[in-house]
Amino acid sequence: MLVVSKINNYYGKQHVLRDLSLDIGEESVGLFGPNGAGKTTLVNAILGIARPASGTITFLERPIHHLATHRIIRLGISVVPQGRELFPIMSVRGNLEAGAAYVPNGRGSIDERLNTVFAMFPVLESRSRQLAGTLSGGEQRMLAIARAMMANPRFLMLDEPSLGLQPSLVADVFRKLREIKKMTSVFVAEQNVYQALKAVDRGYVIENGRIVLDGTAEDLSGNDHIRKSYLGL
Ligand SMILES: Nc1ncnc2c1ncn2[C@@H]1O[C@H](COP(=O)(O)OP(=O)(O)OP(=O)(O)O)[C@@H](O)[C@H]1O
Ligand SMILES: [Mg+2]
């Protein structure tokens, strides 16, 4: 579905992504790595926000690395950015409707999508008129994920969805991701490798802008490097 092939990204002279390749099908895939490894840069490269200096990115076999971001999103890629980035003084419902705004020709009407999303996140329906900024931290994270699902994506990217949440809420987020992966391909950048491994089929490990390891969730859970550096075992 999404194929990244040998991309190189720079910020000025800093070489941030190095000959990076990965391949994501109809599955749920994790991207694990420490602070500054290049996870957000990769997400932004896929979105056309951080342009690779070389290499290719294709989505459904179509090159996208030269497309404008709004066109990439229209092809069916949706994102939950790092940090929540909601519209705090807009209602919950307003935020959800905004999530569908960029995909005018998407499948299903906005009302149908709202129904689908409310069925997945019942708490948001009961709070649909409340201002997004007055939701609890956990509810805001769910709203950010629900907003991305309003675009009815084929490919959903989440950039550190567990960041700043207490452990029980982190578990809730990954439980939701297990449901979501039945509806769309999922690509999740995450530092909470222990929890994320429960929600993904496969994972890649990125360090200093390079993929240093990849494998099934089961392989990674048993891998020595993962156990020592990411699971603290
Ligand atoms: N807009 C920018 N301008 C210059 N350098 C940047 C920019 N964004 C990121 N960088 C640098 O690129 C490298 C990769 O950053 P990136 O945000 O992709 O890492 P990350 O893996 O997402 O980290 P984190 O887990 O902290 O979110 C870092 O060294 C960072 O300082
Ligand atoms: Mg990041």
Image (tube, helix red, strand yellow):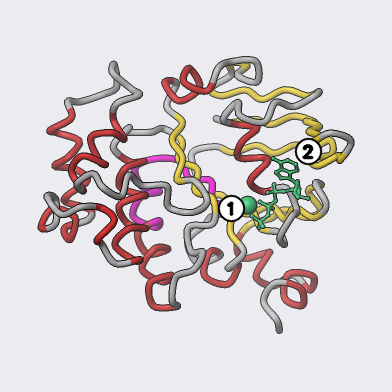
Image quadrant containing the N terminus: top right
Report whether the residue tagged 2 is closer than 8 Å to ligand 1.
no
Query: Left or right: 128 with respect to 162?
Result: left
- Element type where label 1 sits in the image: strand
The image shows residue 85 at horizontal and vertical percentages of 42, 47
**Could you tell which of marks 2 and 1 lies nearer the N-terminus?**
2
- Element type where label 2 sits in the image: strand
In this rendering, the answer to whether 224 lies above or below 86 is below
In this rendering, the answer to whether 99 lies above or below 193 is above
Question: Residue 136: within the magenta?
Answer: no
- Residue type for callout 2: Leu
Closer-to-camera residue (150/217): 150
Range of residues picked out in magenta:
177-189
Give the Cα separation between the discs numbered 2 and 1: 15 Å
Residue at mark 1: 189
- In which quarter of the view is residue 90 placed? top left
The image shows residue 157 at horizontal and vertical percentages of 50, 43
Residue at mark 2: 20
Total numbered circles: 2
Q: Answer few, some or many: residues within 10 Å of disc 2's Cα (few below 14, many 20 plus, some between 14 and 19).
A: many
Report the residue at 21% width, 48% height from top.
92
Question: Residue 179: within the magenta?
Answer: yes
Report whether the residue tagged 1 is closer than 8 Å to ligand 2.
yes
Report the residue at 20% width, 25% height from top.
108
